[in-house]
Image: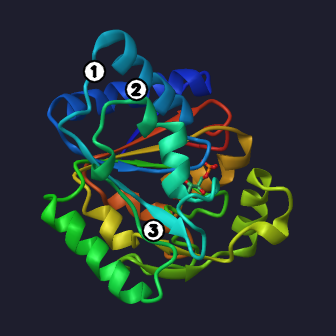
Amino acid sequence: MDIIVRPTAGEVGEYAADIIEPFVRAGATLGLATGSTPNPTYIELARRHREEGLSFANCDAFLLDEYVGLEREDEQSYYATIRREFTNHIDIDDAKVQSLDGRTDDPEAEARSYEDRIRAAGGVDVQILGVGANGHIAFNEPPSALDSRTRRIDLHPTTVADNARFLDNEEQVPRQALTQGVGTIMEAHTIVLIATGANKADAVRALVEGPVTPGCPASVLQNHPRTTVVLDEEAASQLRR
Ligand code: F6R
């Protein structure tokens, strides 16, 4: 894996956008993360659309995960979040922005159908990832099998606490999610993992320098042939090598 360190989160976003732009020009299938980390990247890609004519018209997109039980219209759903933060600001066809249905009464069938839809699209060409402070990617909480597939999962208490910042209080954070599996994510052709801020420094050290282990699901990216980890100085601060 390639490790890139930039001074600020804004410059991290620009670097990540530079990796993603050629995929957009080629009409790629994009894998989109939600959460706060990718927002500078999304802001920069939307700026390139607005000011430089970068078109997403030939792209399609798959989200990584979704909370169980939230309506699409709920502003905390990842369906609504990715539109608000990114895809409403570019020219991608909204019908081509696909996500898991958190209201399904048959999570297993929904998970299978999602894997089928990704496969039918030819797989994800470039996957944008964040990382949880506990080493999760998407909502693959530790321990997660490194060959796991899309499924329903209980959120770790630390993830519930971390995500409470988006809501009025912790009680409102859903306790379950549907998530692409670690094995599913590993099938993406190219991966860009972004981490910014001191609260990610321990997870970054474990994912880059620690053993490849279900205890840190992000560590599996050490085995992915085309992964770039883009960090700000704070997130890189615990790296030894
Ligand atoms: C979101 C996702 C999560 C986040 C991670 C970091 O779709 O899959 O794995 O990437 O929880 O979240 P932030 O970026 O908010 O720190």
Callout 3: few (<14), some (14-19), or many (20+) C-alpha neighbours within 10 Å? some
Q: Which residue is mark 2?
A: 45
Which mark identifies residue 71?
A: none
Label 3 belongs to which residue?
A: 212
Say above or below: 89 vs 32.
Answer: above
Q: Mark 2 or mark 1, which has the lower sequence index?
A: 2
Which image quarter: residue 112? bottom left
**Contact, mark 2 vs mark 3 (Cβ under 8 Å):** no
Mark closer to the chain start, 1 or 3 = 1
Q: Give percent across and percent down for residue 228.
A: 37, 41
Foreground label between 2 and 3: 2
Label 1 Cα neighbours within 10 Å, binned few <14 / some 14-19 / many ≥20: some
Tell me, for residue 54, which label it has, or none.
Answer: 1
Secondary element under disc 2, as helix, strand or loop, is helix
Q: Is residue 20 left or right of residue 213?
A: left
Please tell me in which quadrant of the rendered image residue 67 appears. bottom right
Q: Position of residue 118 (x, y in %)?
A: 23, 64
- Compared to residue 172, the image places residue 91 above or below, namely above
Give the answer, above or below, for where 36 lies relative to 215.
above
**Residue at the spot 28% in from the left edge and 15% down from the top edge:** 53
Mark 2 or mark 3, earlier in chain: 2
Which residue appears at 57% of the width and 67% of the height?
71
Q: The residue tagged with tag 1: helix, strand or loop?
A: loop
Residue 200 percent location from the top left of the image: 66, 48
Per the model, the C-alpha gap separating discs 2 and 1 is: 8 Å
Contact between marks 2 and 1 (CB within 8 A): the answer is yes
Q: Is residue 213 left or right of residue 115?
A: right
